[in-house]
Amino acid sequence: MRITLGVTGGVAAYKAAELVRRLQQEGFSVEVVMTRAACEFITPLTFAALTGKKVITGLFAQSGGEANLESAIEHIAVAQRTDLLLVAPATADIIAKFSRGISDDFLSTLYLATTAPVVVAPAMNVNMWNHPATQENLERLRGRGVHVVNPNEGYLACGMTGAGRLAGQDAIVSTVREVLQLLRDLEGQTVLLTAGPTQEDLDPVRFLTNRSSGRMGYAVAEAAAQRGAKVILVTGPTALDTPAGVTRVNVRSASEMLHSVEENFSAATIAIFAAAVADYRPADAASQKIKKTAGDITLRLEPNPDILAIIARKRGHRLIVGFAAETDKVAENACKKLTDKNADLIVANDVTAEGAGFDVDTNIVTLFARDGRNLALPKLTKHEVAHRILDEVVRLTASVKHQSAD
């Protein structure tokens, strides 16, 4: 498929060269359009060398060439042949032009002329990003169906800190693929997924639980549904909304979760265990509220069922994915769990690491596969992590099918 990449004049313009390579690796044909300001940050020759195509930098004949009908209507030809217009980085200036319908250069004219889907990845100073005018312009574009890949937060070239850094390649490419509906690689699969914490009753008013918000599991459920799978989500108590296209089953305790998983397991082709299941429960839950006394109280706990291990023993040809939330020896513990639980893939993280713990929007994980592949991911949003996990699931599923055919 053909992507037209618009590059505008910001410091992040150099990152567009890396993005071209990534898009090509994803199988896209890339044509680059640069604004005049972008040429001050990176040369058209760089993109011409990467794409093997002419880089368009203006509405009319370039480099002193003779103007002709072809150059005069080139924006129409590009608009008609592209499957998607991606602008990365998108400055506040180009966002304002798109929003207001101003067409005074090739890129802004192309935007008005194309009927292809449009994705913009803004990059700018944090104050420019937060300015009401920029946010109003973005809201207007969203209302017209333009897909916006929000910038990351961090240290900016201007010396300030905050939102404004160009989103990572994974986020941009993921959005491109979703917009083009190329993530349908799980069609025909039924994914059974657990998420959230469990609550183990101590008495009618108290229970034991953990800090899991369920966000990672819900992100995987949402991503799997986006990629065409039928998704059954067995979830402990959370405040999260059910992802679109997902069948939700609410449970509280580990025993309830196991029962629900067993009920739905026969329909599944892939089982992903992302829930933070309590390892122990009170051995004798009180039927009445336990009253406070002057002395100490001893709480006797007994093990909860190991849902992953129990289900993996009945796996058949199903693909099994487990999660390992660790505080030390992450790789060692994950590899042991991979073997002990008879899983195909373990998603492990150090929950004490900044940006990888509970109740945050990001995660830092390493994927340990049964075939020996270990993949350490940088800090990504949980949505991005979800898709990377599913990329591995698809890879392992294809591997299993290939081995069966042999």
Image: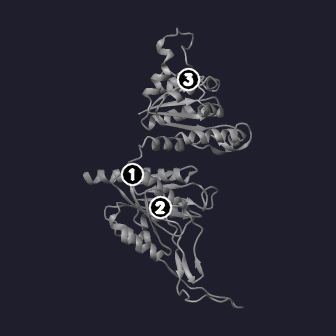
**Residue nearer the viewer, 252 or 319:** 252
What's under tag 3, amino acid-wise?
Answer: Phe
Is 176 above or below relative to 344? above
> Can residue 87 be seen by looking at this rendering?
yes
Q: Check the image and report above or below for 44 versus 303.
A: above
Q: Number of marks in the image? A: 3
Circle 1/circle 2 CB separation < 8 Å: no
**Dot 1 lies on which element?**
loop
Q: Nearer the viewer, mark 1 or mark 3?
A: 3
Distance between the alpha carbons at the discs numbered 2 and 3: 53 Å
Residue furthest right as drawn: 159
Check contact, mark 1 vs mark 3: CB within 8 A.
no
Residue matched to label 2: 335
Q: Residue at x 36, y 71 (%)?
A: 263
At label 2, the amino acid type is Cys
Residue 19 screen position, x and y as percent: 53, 35
**Residue 185, x across and y down, in percent:** 38, 48
Circle 2 or circle 3, nearest the eye: 3
Provide the residue designation for mark 1: 228
SS for callout 3: helix
Q: Amino acid at mark 1?
A: Gly
Looking at the image, residue 242 lies above or below residue 302? above
Residue lying furthest top? 66
Q: Which quarter of the picture shows residue 339?
A: bottom left
Regarding residue 305, the answer to whether it shows in the image is no
Question: Any mark on residue 106, and which?
Answer: 3
Question: Which residue: 57% across, 74% down?
Answer: 209
- Residue at 49 percent across and 44 percent down: it is 174
Work out how far the residue at label 1 is from the one at label 3, CA to CA, in angstroms: 37 Å
Precedes in sequence: disc 2 or disc 3: 3
Mark pair 1, 2: CA separation: 30 Å
Q: Residues within 10 Å of mark 2 (few under 14, many from 20)?
A: many
